Amino acid sequence: MMKNPAFITYVGLSLLLGIWVVLFAHYGSEFLYHTDEIEKPAYPLIVVEEAAPEEQPVETAATEPEAPADGGEGVAALLAAADADAGAKVSKKCASCHSFDKGGPNKVGPNLWDIVGRPIAGGEGYKYSDALSGLGGEWSYDKLDGFLAKPKDFAAGTKMSFAGLKSAEDRANLIAFLRGFSDSPKPLP
């Protein structure tokens, strides 16, 4: 091997310069593009935690909500003034998981044709969670309002990962919109 001091110096300085470039690029970019920790996420993440089937709470009987989900006189008064066209806009949040057409397919969630008055967990060809299957009864306007307000509170253990609609007006508009998807819409309360 040839021991040329200039060559060894050249290789050593090249390695040192390479290390400096890498460090400068790393710390320089960190300095220029530093991001702070986000205190609150821009979009809430919904985490579905599945418990073992024997651990999932199941309600045994369908009950009317103790208090109206809107905190006021209930969904009946809101439905009287509800706007189905506004409900169509709200339904866009539902359309990625549900279909509305008669004989339409089940998606991630069941088809919502003729949902008002239909037995809870009664859609054909869809495997409902034990939480909804154990409720029994039918989807009344009040039950739909309670479920749409916060599905996890209405039926603890439901598969529906939607957080709910906070606005009572939005819920009433959506229910009025869904009511129209029937051969014979149920009378308003």
Image: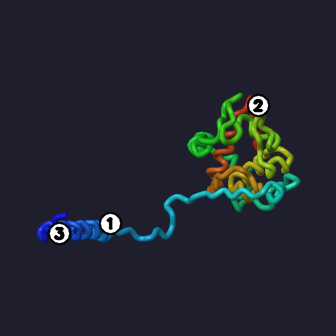
- Give the structural element (helix, strand or loop) at label 1: loop
Residue at 16% x, 68% y is: 3
Question: Closer to the camera: disc 3 or disc 2?
Answer: 3
Amino acid under disc 1 = Tyr
User: Which label sits on residue 184?
Assistant: 2
Marks 2 & 1, CB-CB < 8 Å contact = no
Q: Classify residue 99 by image quadrant.
A: top right
Residue at 15% x, 71% y is: 9
Q: Farthest residue in the right direction? A: 60
Q: Classify residue 188 by image quadrant.
A: top right
- Give the structural element (helix, strand or loop) at label 2: loop
Q: Residues within 10 Å of mark 2 (few under 14, many from 20)?
A: few
Lower sequence index among marks 2 and 1: 1
Residue at 66% x, 56% y is: 48
What residue would you read off at disc 1?
Answer: 33
Residue at 59% x, 41% y is: 96
Lower sequence index among marks 3 and 1: 3
The alpha-carbon separation of the residues under discs 2 and 1 comes to 60 Å
